[in-house]
Amino acid sequence: MSELKPIKQASMLDAFIPVITLVTLLTLAVSYFGDNSSYGPNQIALLIAMGVAVVIGIKNGHGWHDLEQAIVKGISLSLGAVLILFAVGSLIGTWLLSGTVPTMIYYGLMILDPAWFYAAACVMCAVVAMSIGSSWTTAATIGVALIGIAQGLGLSPAITAGAVISGAYFGDKVSPLSETTNLAPAIAGSELFAHIRYMFWTTMPSIATALILFLFLGFTETTSTNNESIDLLSTQLAEQFNLSLFNLVPLLVLLVLAIKKVPAFPAVAIGALVGGLWAVLFQQDLILRLANGETNVITANIMVVWTAFFDGVSIETGNSELNDLLSGGGMSSMLNTVWLIMCALSFGAVLEHLGMLKKFVDVILASAKTTGSLIASTVATCIGTNLLTADQYMAIVMPGRMYKEEYKRRGLDPLVLSRTLEDSGTITSPLIPWNTCAVYMSGVLLVNPLDYIYYCFFNWINPILAVIYGFIGFNIKTLSTKVSETVSKKETA
């Protein structure tokens, strides 16, 4: 019987090689393919880097079967998100067809002024996300409409996307309905509502600063769109759709389901179904125009609505910009996003299985001597995990598990860890182009992450503020004296 080859622990060089490979290939992908890098080149970069990690793992004694199981497990973590993505694709398709999104754009053009549009967009998304606990749903509904309104007003889609994401992540972060807001205190060992109250110390100054910046950008914005062009766009929308406030019922249904804590996938799926029903009830003229000459009304309705679910809608208005605004959606629009998510999570799963991620953390922790450096290290680890695993949940769970005992040993309240995990793990995920959150936001808002990341002010300011608080010792909660004495006695023993 042959002896099993002993497994060697990954060295720091082993850990660095796949990361350097990935960074190099991603840089080349952006250099060669530009905005199209997320439509295949980045996926290949992730798979090649994963292949390099696999070779190193086999060299260190790991078997292919175990590595394959790790990859399968890593991909399985995304299956819930994949279902939500497909449901969102259908929702966008049916909400375009039903007139729900065009109605939001139509009325938004009437009430939103370019001077304060960006700040208003941020506030609107913050309120909705806080109510329903989902940044993804907020971006796919209110966010999509706001991008359309921005185009109608002649404003920057990139800045609008930054405002949408800033508001959506603020609202998601402080909502007790949010998955990440529940996950962080569960991992750190703190209480949910205490965690939310404690986060306000970093989130409120961050969102306030972001709103000031959005107001500044709005007041200094030079738009090429005048009232005549807005009126023209509104008229063209009215020509294509039967516009009324009844078209907003699918949105209200989705908001109610979310507030009632219905899970995201069934809630979004029901929203998509209601959108399809509303299209049949209120957009008969449009459906017949899209039916490609089909004269049977029942057949036309079935074919057009069915197509909206899997392939979205494509509306020809004679105005190319309006065509882009009113066309899209469908499950097929999310296939590239799913492809990128699977590649990214496969890469992250291999690195975690081989102990390469832990290797980085051990080195970081050895140099974190003060509370400020410990918090900065946690922030850096969360960001690094987001970079390498491309998943915000892993960026909360892994650093949380790794640092929990160290925070306790230093007499820091678990609230400090749970807040830091959210200030960095949750917040930075949409800033990384190949992260699942960034891919999702790009997919629904149709704005490249490399364009919008500069304007996600809240997402940049929040982790920076968390590190500053750590170094100056502001609002850093410690354990009670009794608990601290117990920890001290254990260390002495």
Image (spheres, rainbow, N blue to C red):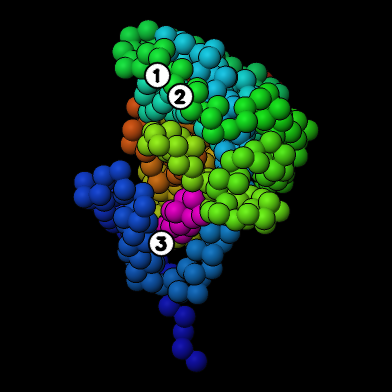
Q: Secondary structure at mark 1?
A: helix
Q: Are marks 1 and 2 in contact (CB under 8 Å)?
A: yes
Examine the rendered structure and indicate whether residue 37 appears above or below residue 198.
Answer: below
Residue found at x 45% / y 74%: 64
Q: Nearer the viewer, mark 3 or mark 1?
A: 1
Find disc 3 in the rendering and name its residue: 9
Find disc 1 in the rendering and name its residue: 229
Examine the rendered structure and indicate whether residue 103 appears above or below residue 367.
Answer: above
Q: Residue furthest right?
A: 260
Q: CA distance from mark 3 to mark 2?
A: 62 Å
Q: What is the magenta range?
A: 330-347
Ranked by sequence position, the earlier of labels 3 and 2 is: 3
The percent position of residue 26, horizontal first and vertical second, equals 29, 49
Report the amino acid beneath label 3.
Answer: Gln
Residue found at x 72% / y 39%: 281
Please name whichever residue, 97 or 301, is drawn nearer the observer in this view of the structure: 301
Ranked by sequence position, the earlier of labels 3 and 1 is: 3
Residue 181 in view? no
Examine the rendered structure and indicate whether residue 247 appears above or below residue 438.
Answer: above
| Label drawn at residue 233 | 2
The percent position of residue 253, horizontal first and vertical second, equals 74, 33
390 vs 485, left or right, is left
Q: Residue furthest bottom?
A: 1
Q: CA distance from mark 3 to mark 1?
A: 64 Å
